[in-house]
Image (tube, rainbow, N blue to C red):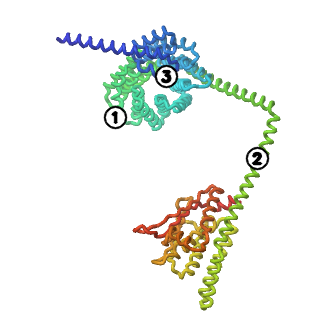
Amino acid sequence: MNKIKKNIFILFAGLTIQLQAQKNYVYVDSIIQQHEKKFTLLSQYLRKIYRDTVTLQYLLEKSKSTFYPEAQILALDMLGKQARINSNYGKALDYYHSALELSKNLSDKSYEIYTLNMIGVVYRRMDAVKSALEFHDKALELALQQNPKTREIEENIAISHNSIGNIYLLLDKQNLAMDHFRKALEIEKKYHNKLGMAINYQNIGSIYETDGNLEKALEYYQRSLIYNDSINSSIGKIICKTSIANILLKKDKPESALEIITPIIKTAEKLGDRYYIADVYYNYGKTLLKNNYTLEGEDFLFKSLAIAKQKNYPSIAAEVYKELSNLYEYKNNPSKALRYYKLYNEEQKKVYNEKNRQIVSDLFLKQLKKENESKIQQLDKVNKRVTQKLRQSKTTLYFTFLFLILLGILALILYKQNQLKTERKLMHMEQNLLRAQMNPHFIFNSLNSIKLYIIHKRSKDAISFLSKFAKLIRIILQSTKDKEMSLADEIEMIKLYVSIENIRMDNSIQFNMEIDPSLALEKIKIPSLLTQPFIENALWHGLSQKTEGDRHLNIRIYPKDDKKILIEIEDNGIGRKRATEIKKSRIFHKKSLGISLSSERLKLFSKTFNEEFRINFIDLFDSEGKPAGTRVIIEIPYTQNTYEKNHS
């Protein structure tokens, strides 16, 4: 019975595989029919089948028969990747070299540059430094020659920089590696390539770790992990978590390191990439040893070593030998410790020997020479163009220069004329405002009040009134000379003006002024006589018409922020609507110029001095919705002597 069930299961599984294969073949046929040639788009289409080697072989044959080299190259690329993952590097190189020959015949150099980089990646996995550097350098050189540089080209430049950086890192050339990683990261950020950013953040973190800057290394590893999580890159997450675990070991936190690295063992084994399995086994074994799990740790080190020797990973083998040497030294077994240390040195020499150092130095000098030659050629071309243009256009340059001078003079004249026009307009407004403030009616009534005091022999009141009146006239006249006055002088003018008008109104006004103590009254400068028209309006159009109840005039001055102050003028009079109705009902009524002139004047100040003045009128109402007065809020930018400096 069990045998029958097993056969049925095998038959069912076979049918499922056949159905999926047929489905994939149909998908490949649709891609062949579309005949997309652009590297990025075609890569995206083929991503769905990149692990299915049977379907990839079908794609390879189909693209050959339909003369579709772009699809043929990417089929070979994906087959090469699968061979590389399985550590079959010879087969991977065969696929990639076939792809390289095809790509050389294409006008789109993205395919050739990409294939050169992929060959370099295979050699780098083999720790074949010389060959890896040669192919990545060829890819970078060819990519830099392309103009204009498409996104595909720039992303391949990033791959080249990243790979060359990794080789420099392997050979302990941290400064050179960092330079290449940062160049790669800049390109990946430009296109918001999350995988590219994850890879380069990881690589930069490894440099900081090598330099002993553990906090900075951890910061970059965590950045990399965020991007790897967002794209669900299993290999990326393995690399990041392994690196974070190593940082925790160096920070003497072995328990935390073990907690992070343990779950990724199964992930690595499931992926099947022998290189990463060997690397994870090594790091897991090292972490177990730090947690005093000696036997288990030693076992995983030997598992890692077996894969590294079988697949020829000298850099991983070297690290394992070094860890085993330390272990046996700890176990007080000096002969084994020495033996493994010698093996460590032998493996290190395979990667980091004098020949490889010379290759790196030669490549660095070659790249430096290329960059300098390129800069010299560019400068030479620019110099030739400039010289030629100068020879051809001396006369044109002369007339252009003359025209620009004339244009500048004309612009200056127009600017001065506009400035004079603005100043005249401002002066005219200020003169009109002065006339509005010193209207004959006000002067006559004030002098009449003084006369009445004298007639009634109230000499003290007469002297007091006359003193206030004289001070007020002095402030008003002084304001005609200055475009601004201190806030202290403005406050004094307000008090004098309200006091004089209140006397004329039988002292029926209850006046209150609140000033924020934090304001430096003498230092703050504002446009002169700014508030008088609004106070006059509150007194004579709001409060004087009120027949019932108390009459209140409240003025508050306080900072809005460190650049602006607010002046609030509030009365509990009859309100603007009723005051307008009363004015219209009179046979003779004069137009209130003070407020309109002040508003225009502030608009002109805003335009001239690039400072924003605001006036806001708010109608007040009581609980029954009846008019209960008016509040005027004036928003004033202030500095020390701002307007005067601009005006001069």
Nearer the observer: mark 1 or 3; the answer is 3
Q: Secondary structure at mark 3?
A: helix
- The residue located at (62%, 61%) in the rendering is 602
Q: Secondary structure at mark 1?
A: helix
**Above or below for 525 versus 55:** below
- The residue located at (70%, 58%) in the rendering is 422
Q: Amino acid at mark 2?
A: Gly
Q: Residue furthest top?
A: 65
Q: Residue furthest right?
A: 395
Q: Earlier in the sequence, mark 1 or mark 3?
A: 3
Residue 512 x/y as whole percent: 51, 74
Identify which residue, 254 or 589, lies in the foreground: 589
Q: Secondary structure at mark 2?
A: helix
State the separation of the CA atoms marked 2 and 1.
Answer: 75 Å
Identify which residue, 131 or 82, lies in the foreground: 82
State the separation of the CA atoms marked 1 and 3.
Answer: 46 Å
Residue 544 x/y as whole percent: 53, 76
**Above or below for 403 versus 136:** below
Q: Earlier in the sequence, mark 3 or mark 2?
A: 3
Q: Residues within 10 Å of mark 1 (few under 14, many from 20)?
A: some
Q: Could you say which disc has been placed on residue 408 in the image?
A: 2
- The residue located at (79%, 40%) in the rendering is 401
Q: Residues within 10 Å of mark 3 (few under 14, many from 20)?
A: few
Q: Quadrant of the N terminus?
A: top left
Q: Residue furthest left?
A: 1
The residue labelled by disc 1 is 255
The residue labelled by disc 3 is 41
Q: Amino acid at mark 3?
A: Leu
Q: Earlier in the sequence, mark 2 or mark 1?
A: 1
Can residue 355 be seen here? no
